[in-house]
Image (cartoon, helix red, strand yellow):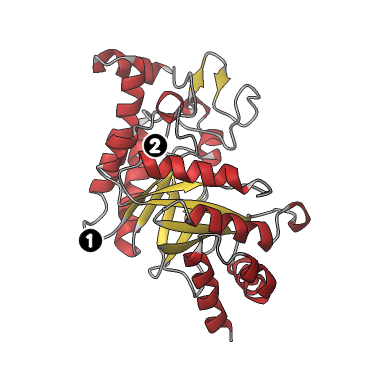
Amino acid sequence: MKFGMFIYEPTPVEGFDLQVYRLKSERGIVGTPNPEMTTNIACFGDNNMAAKHPDWVQISENGPALRTNKKYNLRWDIVCNNEKQMVDYMLDLIEDTAEKTKGITVSSMHVADHGFCQCPRCKEAHKKSGLDWLEFRAQTVTDFIGAAKERVKKNKPFYVGLLPDPVNAYERFGMDFDALAKYATAFVVPHWSKTYATPWYFESLSRAFKKLLKKPVYPGLYIRGPGDDPNELENHTQILKTACRVARTGVDGLIFLAANATIMKDFQKACVADTKLREDLEGYGGKPVLELVDKWESILD
């Protein structure tokens, strides 16, 4: 089992197999690649581009794919998958970054949600495709991932980020798991949450994705993101418990998200220092997680 970290600054942290820097988050701001890290790029989730080009935003009968649209649970603004200028921009960024770094993970490459996108671009492309509506949406997403994979050298990994809906992802987001598996080195499935008080929920999600996906599965757990109030977040206890519960599902890896290296290191230190918790978690079935903490202890000593 492999372990990764996912942070918003280009600073590696010792003790992980996979070091991922969020070069471009859904804010739309692009950072500077670190050659020693794998790079995450959020594709069509882009607040910056949506503000600059309102006509690029995905559209539905219930309004645009904007955070202000309360009929959907949109965490960022989402640009149309068939806006050629955006597609070209993203593919060029992926290619350029892949040349400079250890690999690529892509996220936010999906359709916003059910009912999207019904802009003139998509209506015209759908008409020309000869496919039914759901097939067209899924083919659009898959074609983009295929094109992105072609921009990444064959000797470098290409991770595809999903949304954590194992049942309705095709109808909601245009995600065809089997089709995407042809291009993915592995899938990253975010289980981001500010609380892990009910770890069975995340364990169940992990079991479902492990059963469905035809490539390695890396769920992600949330420590603290940019701008979060630490008093409103889970401490290391429930995160580590949930990590053990997820690990026993047979997933292939696990990724921890933090805003920066300091937060990640503080999490490592808290896990190492909590010897009682580590003893309590013996027998949970999450031995790889406890071995990871043992590794952190040897690094921190």
Furthest residue toward front: 283
Q: Position of residue 220 (x, y in %)?
A: 51, 52
Disc on res. 134: none
The structure residue drawn at horizontal position 54% and vertical position 41%, both measured from the top left corner, is 48
> In the image, 100: left or right of 47?
left
The structure residue drawn at horizontal position 33% and vertical position 64%, both measured from the top left corner, is 100
Q: Which circle, 2 or 1, is nearer the viewer?
A: 1
Whether residue 50 appears in this view of the structure is yes
Q: Which residue is mark 1?
A: 155
Q: Amino acid at mark 1?
A: Asn
Q: Which residue is mark 2?
A: 86
Q: Position of residue 201 (x, y in %)?
A: 58, 42
* Quarter in which the N terminus is drawn: bottom left
Query: Which residue is at the front of the view, 77 or 256?
Result: 256
Q: Amino acid at mark 2?
A: Met
Furthest residue toward bottom: 301
Query: Which residue is at the front of the view, 246 or 235?
Result: 246
Q: Badge 2 local density, few (<14 within 10 Å), some, or many (20+)?
A: some
Whether residue 274 appears in this view of the structure is no
Q: Is residue 29 above or below residue 129?
A: below
The structure residue drawn at horizontal position 27% and vertical position 53%, both measured from the top left corner, is 152
Answer with mark 2 or mark 1, whichever residue precedes in sequence: 2
> In the image, 270: left or right of 215?
right
Label 1 element class:
loop
